[in-house]
Image (cartoon, rainbow, N blue to C red):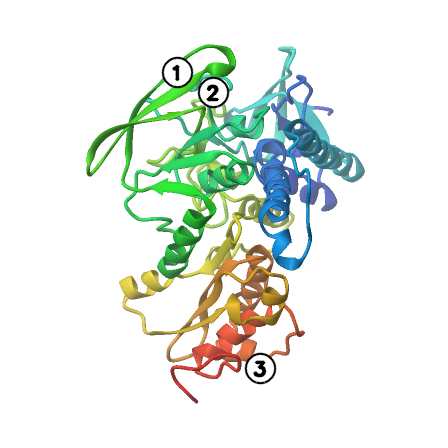
Amino acid sequence: MPNEYDIVVIGAGPAGYAAAIRAAQLGMRTACIDKALDREGNPTLGGTCLNWGCIPSKALLDASHKYMEAAHQFDEVGIGVEGLSVDVAKMMQRKDGVVAKLTAGIGMLFDGNGVVSLPGSGRLLAHKHVEYTTHEGEVTELAAEHVILAPGSVPMEIDPVPLVPDVVVDSAGALEFEEVPPRLGVIGAGVIGLELGSVWCRLGSEVVLLEALDEFLPIADQRIARDALRAFGRQGLDIRLGTRVTGASVKGRGKKKQVDVGYQDKDGEHTLTVDKLIVAVGRRPYTEGLLAPDSGVNLDERGFLYVNDLCETDAPDVYAVGDVVRGPMLAHKGAEEGVMVAERIAGHKPMVNYECIPNVIYTHPEIAWVGKTEQDLKADGEAYSVGTFPYAANGRALAANDAEGMVKIVAEEETDRILGVHVFGPQASELIGQAVIAMEFEASAEDIGLTMFAHPTLAEAVHEAALAVGGRAIHMVNRKRR
């Protein structure tokens, strides 16, 4: 029957499309429903990550970093630049081209693997039936042996600061500015706020970030966060901690519009006037219209779909993956969950190792980590050893004129097993992959120390940090010798 499938996936972001592709590869008749439309109103695959998140933001981060290097660092290595300028329209056009190429690529993968793509909305009914509504309003009921829910997440809003098109925007709107705002406000100094703030700061904006927490990046290692805060301040990011935003009002007309942002801190009430304001206070699971009352799927106290370690919901043969379930809202975590579910449905026995999920903040220098932080281990009362190595002592970093940062490794004191790796520096997002592999194989710091690394490379900083755990680093003075 044309409306009967082995698997129906709702959502075509990284979690959903990975699940759909893997299921089809395993020989299951698979359909994937997704409601996303691009700015022209055409169906688009890839979810927030490819369309309005990971990919477009990295395109702008890389472009803005190149501009910053040309404007402020080329002279240091003997390269003169005259007439340097920023063409925001061209930058945005290139960003859109990257997005279009990748989203079209998902469509090609669907076609090549036999996934049936269904543009529109999906709603889970009882007994694994799915109500599919096209964008034109036509309703069809699909029957499935298994259903995978991957609707993703959306930016959180805050009541005191309603969005105003092109002036007070969320993370998606911040990727669409037509010119560099002279003064930019960002509510939230987490991952999204730092990345978006960095883009426009590099291009010439005066950027102020208002963060409600008193501590900067509490999810990261405290030493790394402290070093990063100082570095970002030198770059021009004005990060104000312990601030509570109380309201925002738009004044002026047309291109002369500005936003007055009211906030409180320990010194009282203040007003910040900016030309644009980005609300970057996090994301929430997107479940509107997803579940019929008798679907059998339950939500937890935070509004996420409740699942066990295998991503099974309370409804038999119904799974949920990605941003809509517990754990960090990361594209790679969702994709691994999607693949795991597809393979388990096919009779295989994979697991997702939630202890080895890499986290990255794509500022410059980048921040990346996997596993436990030193503060985690202190709170748990675990005995541990620490090894650190600065980029300033790394030959490749110095040769590249990009030597700010450090690598930090924490290992179990008795067994030397690596418990966490934390990197602040150029290409941290690439170096952390080595740490993930090592931790997946339960390597010790000594294992990395006994591994040969190419010279000169940034990866040698990981090698030296591992040696430093045992007091055996070669290219710095050790506090302890063995």
Contact between marks 3 and 2 (CB within 8 A): the answer is no
Q: Is residue 477 above or below residue 435?
A: below
Element type at mark 2 = loop
Which quadrant is home to the C terminus? bottom left
Q: Which dot, 3 or 2, sits closer to the camera?
A: 2
The label on residue 250 is 1
Is residue 405 placed above or below 203 in the rendered structure?
A: below
Q: Is residue 332 visible?
A: yes
Of 28 and 78, the residue lying toward us: 78
Say whether residue 477 is left or right of residue 246.
Answer: right
**Could you tell which of marks 1 and 3 lies nearer the N-terminus?**
1
Identify the amino acid type marked 3. Answer: Leu
Q: Amino acid at mark 2?
A: Val
Lower position in the chain sequence, tag 2 or tag 1? 2
**Residue name at image x 68 percent, y 24 percent:** 118
Estimate the x, y position of residue 440 in percent, counting from the top left. Answer: 54, 65
For the residues marked 1 and 3, what is the alpha-carbon distance in whole angstroms?
Answer: 60 Å
Circles 1 and 3: CB atoms closer than 8 Å: no
Identify which amino acid the numbered label 1 is placed on: Val
Q: Position of residue 439 (x, y in %)?
A: 52, 67
Q: Position of residue 257 (x, y in %)?
A: 45, 15
Q: Residue at x 42, y 79 (%)?
A: 415
Reading the image, the residue beneath label 2 is 167
Q: CA distance from mark 3 to mark 2?
A: 54 Å
Kindly identify the residue that appears in the image at 33 percent across and 65 percent down.
Answer: 377
Q: Is residue 359 above or below residue 139?
A: below
Viewer-side residue, 201 vs 168:
201
Identify the residue position indicated by label 3 in the image: 450
Q: Observer-nearest residue: 409 or 33?
A: 409
Q: Is residue 31 visible?
A: no
Q: Which mark is residue 193?
A: none
